[in-house]
């Protein structure tokens, strides 16, 4: 790829990076954001741009970002194609939070100095909202209101090198496999990072091989996106739920945040268990690095014959840099490499 420069604005949401490309230098055509994602998956130019920005030396194995594209219609402010080192994802809560902050901070969406503004975003899994809170002319928080979430399957026994894992599959814009980390002899802490990645990969690969993670309405949303390894942190915030998790997604990437769409999926599971609900209790959701989201059920609905929740995930994002990446035509390491 030869380009005069690729401009990006980088944020982090609860420690997880999000690299925003407001003007992608390659065409990303399609009749909808979901269609644009499907075409990007098969487009060497789109894949090349993604790899360039994810791979070392410009990125790293756990890089995440998005290409801003037109929305599906004038009911949304923008669309986005989410990407990571292994491809284009269907949903990204931490990215939506960052996009909400970016859209308001740059003036793309008007917002008061004190109050809230809704940034409506079309993503491959549907239409979502980033409700941006402002105080004194600063963005101080963002509520990510996601597509409905629901449970797909429970008590799936998956063999791993640490024993059989009892897995719950739930949808939160992408399909996640939830597992109690302690049932596999693990705790969610940085010291167990390699072990958590290994078992997360095993569970995802086993479920994908069995073909059990099927979206009921759109095959483009099928497949396990990530494994959520969680543990309860006790009743100190009762009646609220207090958990820590690590989400191992794609091929072994680790979400530094509590995972936005993963938190939405966890809310669907906990709501079915009767542990969270409209008006409370809520989920205090910590990440492997100690950052936190608050997850709340703000409504209920049905998706086909399934009971579903409308999940809201609250956090904030911070800008970390403005960049213009270039490619030297003599550089032999293009688009780059991933060392893991």
Image (cartoon, rainbow, N blue to C red):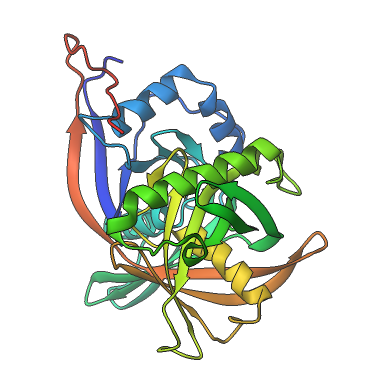
In the image, residue 59 sits, relative to residue 264, either above or below, namely: above
Does residue 253 sit above or below 11 in this rendering?
above
- 295 and 81: which is toward the camera: 295
Q: Residue at x 30, y 73 (%)?
A: 134
| Residue 171 is at least partly visible in this image | no
Rendered location of residue 80, percent (x, y): 46, 43
Q: Who is closer to the viewer here, 87 or 243?
A: 243
Q: Is residue 142 left or right of residue 229?
A: left
Residue 203's spot in the image, x, y percent? 55, 47
How many numbered marks are there?
0
Quadrant of the rendered image containing residue 157: bottom right
In x, y percent, where is residue 195? 38, 50
Quadrant showing the N terminus: top left
Question: Residue at image x 43%, y 44%?
Answer: 198
On the picture, is 280 further left or further right than 303? left
Give percent across and percent down for residue 91. 52, 49
Looking at the image, can residue 317 be seen?
yes
Describe residue 118's horizontal placement relative to residue 289 as left or right: right
Q: Residue at x 58, y 81 (%)?
A: 276
**Residue with the most extreme right position:** 305
Furthest-top residue in this view: 330
Q: Residue at x 24, y 30 (%)?
A: 56
> Residue 192 versus residue 205: which sits nearer the camera?
192
Residue 286, quarter of the rendered image: bottom left
């Amino acid at each position: 790829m030869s380009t005069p420069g690729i401009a990006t604005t980088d944020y982090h949401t609860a420690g997880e990076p999000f690299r925003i490309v407001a003007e992608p230098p390659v065409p990303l055509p399609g009749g909808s954001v979901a269609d644009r994602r499907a075409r990007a998956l098969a487009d060497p130019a789109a894949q090349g741009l993604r790899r360039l920005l994810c791979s070392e030396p410009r990125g790293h194995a756990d890089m995440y970002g998005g290409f801003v594209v037109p929305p599906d219609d004038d009911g949304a402010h923008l669309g986005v194609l989410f990407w990571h080192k292994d491809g284009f994802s269907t949903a990204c809560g931490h990215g939506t939070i960052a996009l909400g902050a970016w859209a308001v901070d740059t003036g793309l969406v008007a917002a008061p100095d004190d109050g809230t503004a809704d940034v409506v975003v079309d993503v491959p899994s549907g239409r979502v909202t980033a409700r941006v809170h402002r105080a004194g002319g600063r963005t101080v928080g963002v509520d990510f209101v996601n597509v409905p979430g629901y449970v797909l399957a429970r008590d799936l026994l998956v063999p791993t090198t640490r024993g059989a894992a009892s897995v719950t599959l739930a949808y939160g814009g992408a399909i996640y496999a939830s597992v109690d980390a302690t049932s596999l002899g693990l705790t969610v802490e940085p010291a167990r990072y390699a072990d958590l990645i290994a078992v997360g990969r095993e569970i995802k690969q086993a479920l994908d091989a069995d073909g059990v993670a099927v979206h009921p309405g759109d095959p483009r949303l099928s497949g396990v996106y990530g494994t959520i390894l969680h543990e309860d942190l006790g009743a100190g915030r009762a009646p609220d739920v207090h958990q820590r998790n690590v989400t191992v997604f794609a091929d072994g990437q680790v979400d530094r945040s509590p995972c936005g769409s993963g938190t939405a999926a966890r809310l669907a599971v906990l709501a079915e268990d009767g542990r969270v609900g409209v008006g409370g209790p809520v989920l205090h959701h910590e990440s492997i690095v100690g950052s936190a989201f608050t997850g709340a059920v703000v409504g209920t609905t049905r998706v086909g014959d399934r009971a579903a929740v409308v999940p809201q995930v609250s956090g904030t994002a911070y800008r970390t840099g403005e960049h213009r990446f270039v490619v030297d035509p003599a550089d032999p390491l293009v688009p780059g490499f991933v060392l893991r």
